[in-house]
Amino acid sequence: MTRISDLALHQLTLAQTLGTQKRVADLQIQVSSGLRAQRYTGVASEAHRLVSLQASQARTDQFVKNNKIVDGRLTAMETNIAQVFDSATQFRTLLMNALNNSNGSDLQIAAEAGNFKQQVANLLNVQVDGRYLFAGSRTDVKPVELAGWTPPPSLTPPLTLPLPQITAEYYRGDAVQQAAEIDADLTVDYGITGDEDAFEYVLRAMQYVETAGSPPNRDALESALALINTALGTEQPNAARGVEPIQRDLADLRSLVGTSRRAIEEANTRHQEYALHLEQNIGDIQSVDVAQALTELSNQQTQLEASYTMLSRLSQLSLLNFLK
């Protein structure tokens, strides 16, 4: 029974017991979660720094995530440009065989040219996550539409000046180059559009041969070979065939994509290194030393048990028990 004379002592003992009970509960949470506190108030002195570090961590993680998406697009683009190069190389071999073979019609070169042309068009119409990669900013529009496309006629000496301008009339995209912010204050322009001169030369060469008749017209075959050689960068443009120089051949286009990928890879390497630094600093603020917490938990549990025992005994004190 509690009397007025010992009420203050009883309340103090009870308060200390409840405080010990709370410390035991907090330590149990720390041991199970590995965190010093569940709220910022638990690390009040370092809360501002922790919030700043966590914001930097979230931004860094978002950069890495976005960069991986862009790199996936560039990987598909690089792969398809390489396949266009392979198709053009195979077609060049077919052209040379036809030009060196008096029985060129036996090679079914017109049909082969049509197949190669459609293959290249399909490669340029590739989609990743519903986006047409070679269409510039018009990612919802198929960039290459060959239906109804009529390229300039093949030129045979003597040439009529002026020469026809290179125009990719099959192209349905735009000339806008995509851009990605790969790091703070660092934006990279990336991507190739389907109206590049090298692509137009490849498709035009295949169109010339597809429509060259049977047996194939030799002038058409030679014009097609001049276009393919220029697109591949294997020979200088054939001025006699009216083939103009182009700014970038297929190998150059692939290198441009590779350069963008390297920039993104380097940025992600920096982000990942910075993320490790941030994680360490956040851990220093948030994480608890589990071994130390377990030792402290054991001590507090011992104190709590002693407090319960003392409270139990105090509640049993009476004059009758004292006289006994």
Image: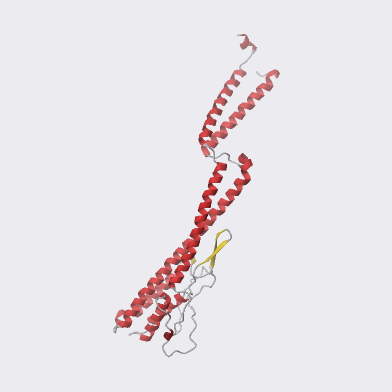
Name the residue nearer the viewer: 309 or 293: 293
Looking at the picture, how far across and down is residue 178, in whole percent? 53, 67
Query: Is 55 situated above or below 96?
Result: above
- Which residue appears at 56% of the width and 31% of the height? 24
Count of marks, rendered view: 0
Quarter of the image that includes the C terminus: top right
Q: Is residue 125 visible?
A: no
Q: Against 219, is 252 above or below?
A: above
**In this image, 143 relative to 213: left or right?**
right
Name the quadrant containing residue 309.
top right
The colour style of the image is secondary structure
Q: Furthest-right residue in view? A: 4
- Residue farthest to the front? 236
Q: Is residue 289 above or below residue 99?
A: above
Instruction: Tell whether 87 sits left or right of 253.
Output: left
Relative to 225, residue 178 above or below: above
Q: Position of residue 176 (x, y in %)?
A: 54, 71
- Residue under the image location 32 percent in, 81 percent down: 98
Q: Quadrant of residue 41?
A: top right
Picture coordinates of residue 157 (x, y %)?
41, 89
Tell me the residue at 38%/72% (across/down).
87
Q: Is residue 257 visible?
A: yes
Quadrant for the N terminus, please. top right
Q: Residue at x 48, y 65 (%)?
A: 259
Q: Nearer the viewer, residue 136 or 317?
A: 136
Q: Position of residue 73 (x, y in %)?
A: 47, 63
Q: In the visual, does 38 lie left or right of 244?
A: right
Q: Residue 104 is drawn in which quadrant?
A: bottom left
Q: Please give left or right for residue 34 compared with residue 118 in the image.
A: right
